[in-house]
Image: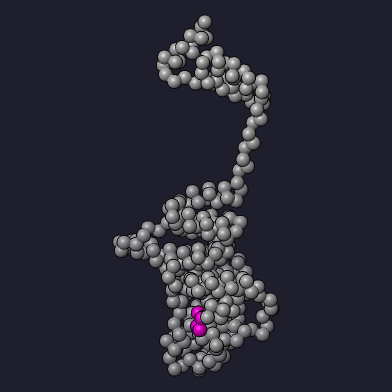
Amino acid sequence: MAKRAMGKGLSAILGEEIAKVNKVTDAGAEKLVGKVAMISIEDITTNPFQPRSNFDNDALVELAQSISELGIIQPITVRKNGMKFELISGERRFRASQIAGLTEIPAYIRLADDRNMLELAIVENLQREDLDPIEMAYSCKRMMDELGLTQEEVAKRLGKGRSTITNFMRLLRLPAIIQAELRDIHRNESLDENGDGAASVVFSVGHARALLNLPSENDQIALYKKILKGGLSVRQTEALAQSIKSPKPAKSPTPANPSIEALSKDLGNYFSSKVNIQMKANGKGKILIDFTSDEDLQRIISKFNS
């Protein structure tokens, strides 16, 4: 899947005003708050108040490999101070990007006193018609992480039900490759509507929600690939997810009954045909006699009349 550019450089947004914008009252601040800009990794320092100090190296290497293949799915968040930036959130992505050899990283930029402007910028972004479900989920997460809001408060500000916000947020638990697919949904649908020859959209939010029921990322990715390959519907995906999550136990074979087997053999000899006797635990059952033609059936019936 091709990587997508997630932002412009600061010079493209502010020109020569870059260094002068540090507070919301500075000229040009409205162009910066809420935007995603590409920032040199060398200009970013980590947050000294970061409560988390231990990062799993193997997990960082895996994330770095994902970033190398797919790019950054969610920008980090930094606070601007002159031409330098302090990391607010996204240290795992920042560290993994360093491992991946990136020189720039997409970032949301905050200023020293931009809470109100930030909230307005996020809400304005959420009102876009072409907003994809992952952008929606990350925007809700930003309102919670950076503005200290609860899911219920986010729902009230956006005029949506709390369950709607919860469902969007759950999408962030999906692997990066599936999140990237969801980000392409609106682009693909638009191409289809315009008749530009794009492949039909076979993956939707409904498919993604079904994948959330699976116990591991490996299971989610495996079923995701089956959806794309086989064009599975949401209902088919839900059924497969349920069978993976809660497989039905294999039926234990009915133990052989020597007396029934002997009787089947005797009847088979009598009718000169294969006879199968099926008996349940309660004593009920049936006798099946094979025949190969109408003449063979008449022969067997004559045995009953003799």
Where, by quadrant of the figure, is residue 203 drawn?
bottom left
Where, by quadrant of the figure, is residue 115 drawn?
bottom right
Picture coordinates of residue 172 (x, y %)? 56, 66
| Position above or below: 27 against 291 | below
Q: Is residue 168 magenta?
A: no
Closer to the camera, 193 or 65?
A: 65
- Main SS type for the magenta part? strand
Q: Is residue 143 visible?
A: no
Which residue is pictured at 48% across the width and 54% down the height?
226
Picture coordinates of residue 180 (x, y %)? 48, 67
| Position above or below: 173 against 52 | above
Picture coordinates of residue 262 (x, y %)? 63, 19
Instruction: Point out the residue furthest to the top here.
Output: 306
Q: Is residue 103 magenta?
A: yes
Q: Which residues are magenta?
A: 102-106
Which residue is pictured at 53% across the width and 54% down the height?
210
Q: Is residue 82 visible?
A: yes
Coloring applied to the structure: one colour
Quadrant of the snapshot with the N terminus: bottom left
